[in-house]
Image (tube, rainbow, N blue to C red):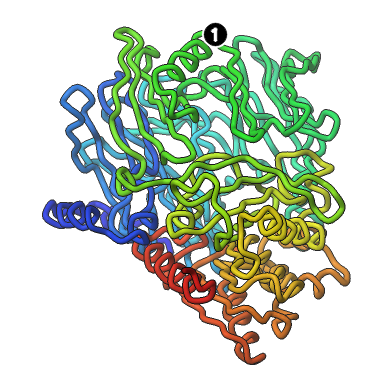
Amino acid sequence: MKKTILGAAAAILCAVDPLHMAAIAATAQTASAAVQFGARENVEYIDISPDGHHVVYLQAGPGRATYVFLADLDQGGESRLVVRSDGNPERLRWCNFVTNDRLICQMSAVDFSGIVALPFTRLISIDTTGQNLKLLGQQSSFYDSRVRQFDGEIVDWSGGEDGTVLMSRSYVPEAGRTGSHISRTSDGIGVDRIDVRTLRATRVEAPNPTASFYMSDGRGVVRVMATRAMRGATGQLGATVDFRYRADGSERWQTLGSWDTRTGAGLYPLAVDRDLDAVYVLQKLNGRLALYRVKLDGSMASELVYANEHVDVDDVVRSSRGLRVIGVTFAEAERRTVYFDQDYAALARNLGHAIPNLPLIDFGSASADGNRILVHAGSDSDPGRYYVYDRATRRLNEIMLARPELENVALSQVRSISYPAADGSQIPGYLTLPPGREDARGLPAVILPHGGPSARDEWGFDWLAQYLAHQGYAVLQANYRGSAGYGDDWLRQNGFQGWRTSIGDITAGARWLAQQGIADPNRLAILGWSYGGYAALQAGATEPGLFKAIVAIAPVTDLQQAKDDVADYTDARNVAEFIGSGPHVAEGSPLRHADAIVAPVLLFHGDHDLNVRVIHSQRMDAALRAAGHQSELTVFPGLEHDLADSTARAQMLGRIGAFLDANLHRQ
């Protein structure tokens, strides 16, 4: 894997054939719905330069390729290629400016050559011309005592000096080098100040074997450290993360608090505010996460900043490069941001008036002087547009579309709804009807449960739901009990241990659609990804007559298999505790009940999926066939859990469309 990752430095520096790009653009104009909706987002990441004159953005190329372009905002958006990756296996994840002419980008890959499959990330620094590429992590050695999976993270983009960053680096000691006095002994995660041009490094925090991450004040000073100890002789990570802090000007670490990764008990730091000498943390209030501010002066004085009585607060909003906390965000029926900074609050209001049809407004990075700001705006029926707002001229310029393939395609509005579960609880969710069908009756319908299970759906654009609606289906997305974001009482044990409640809430949504007359009860299907795929199969096993077709993408099919899959990894015990033990492991595994599933099943899976191993779909397909039931499995070679390949996604959508058409007998 070392050769693969290091070789990527040269491999991704490939020229783009302009004729090929032109052919792609021409094809998009006449593409099928599966190709249009299956195309990855045109802009996967974007950042603005410190002087505000350029943006760097990651653009989805053909298939699984990713291109990095630099665009000149003062020359009509003229773009030129910086670097690219083919996605086989290396994937570019993001690129940010350090200076006006120097970038840092992250690459990732999965190595399947060893005993266990391992994910890797690497940080590289490169000129905006595509030259002088350098790896920022510690240089690998033949004598390294273990594999370095993740070489580090950027803790502070300012670094305290021009052209430098603070990077938390993963240090691996050497072993087996005999007769030498130069063996490396540093072990764990430390922090270095790195010049991104010369790679000259200055030690800021000594490597610590128990450290998991560090947090700075945004101005070059580390203030918070997280540690996570191994449990027992197994070398597996414990569920508790401990946090320590330093008072301003002190070198002594003091206790800040802890966080239980399973229950969310304790406090979790999000950002340090140097001017207030405080850290913003998430902490429970009446069973829901709220935002608090804790002083870092030794007093540990804490004050409530914001709480919502219905949903969890989930993050803070920061100004460019994280220098200031300017607001807090959470999702009710729609995502909302409450701004503490009056300038940003006023700007958000003004933009809301200027682009009223795009209410989901997010501020991205800004130029160093704060004058030019990246803005993303979208809605339920608009995938999103990127703008640059100039404060001095008060001009808002649209620079690119998130999904240009869908620009002239009729898209659907999404309605927030709720429906009763079997015990009378009201389940929140979203209903998407085919374009132009405001009062549709007797439609074929698809239930689309989200993954996780500790996640949730939100109001906004969803390419999978929109594709199904475009094909003529009513689509229901439910935030069933076991979903995150609604507090402890809603999350409960989680959607695996409490599968009966979660699956019951999902199937209740199908019945509600039929009772309301929206859906034809004889033309119901269920489709899901990850936990959603698990839910689709488990619903088919527990209520065999309800759905006429089942689609599962990268599904968990056996709970014991899910625990066995991670037995050789450091988080094995945490996964085992999350899934739990007892009768529900067998009762809640659709693989064990394949004979009860009577509806035709369509399965998709990537064979490089580390979230849910492909064996889950392979065993499910075999079990269904052995039981004499209809099943079809498509395995995508080299793809991970998100199937980040436009060609593969288009193929999948096309097959889903034909499958639903055939089994729901649409007229």
**Residue 582 picture quarter:** bottom right
Question: Residue 610 appears at what percent x and percent y?
Answer: 56, 64
Q: Image height check: is 90 above or below 330? A: below
Q: SS for tag 1? A: helix
Give the residue type at disc 1. Gln
**Is residue 235 in sight in this rendering?**
no
Figure check: 306 above or below 335 = above
Nearer the observer, 203 or 197: 197
In the rendered image, which residue does mark 1 sit on? 342
Which residue is nearer to you in this view: 480 or 197?
Answer: 480
Residue at 64% in and 42% down: 212
Question: For mark 1, does the 10 Å Cα neighbourhood hold few (<14), some (14 to 19), or many (20 or more) residues?
Answer: few
Residue drawn where x is 32% and y is 25% of the image: 49
Between 210 and 111, the residue placed more toward the observer is 111
Q: Is residue 545 left or right of residue 528?
A: right
646, above or below 216, in the image: below
* Residue visible at 62% across and 87% down in the picture: 629
Q: Report if residue 45 is visible in the image.
A: yes
- Give coordinates of residue 377: x percent, y percent: 43, 30
Q: Residue furthest left?
A: 19
Vertical side of 229 occupied by 268: above or below: above
- Image coordinates for residue 534, horizontal then vertical, percent: 66, 66
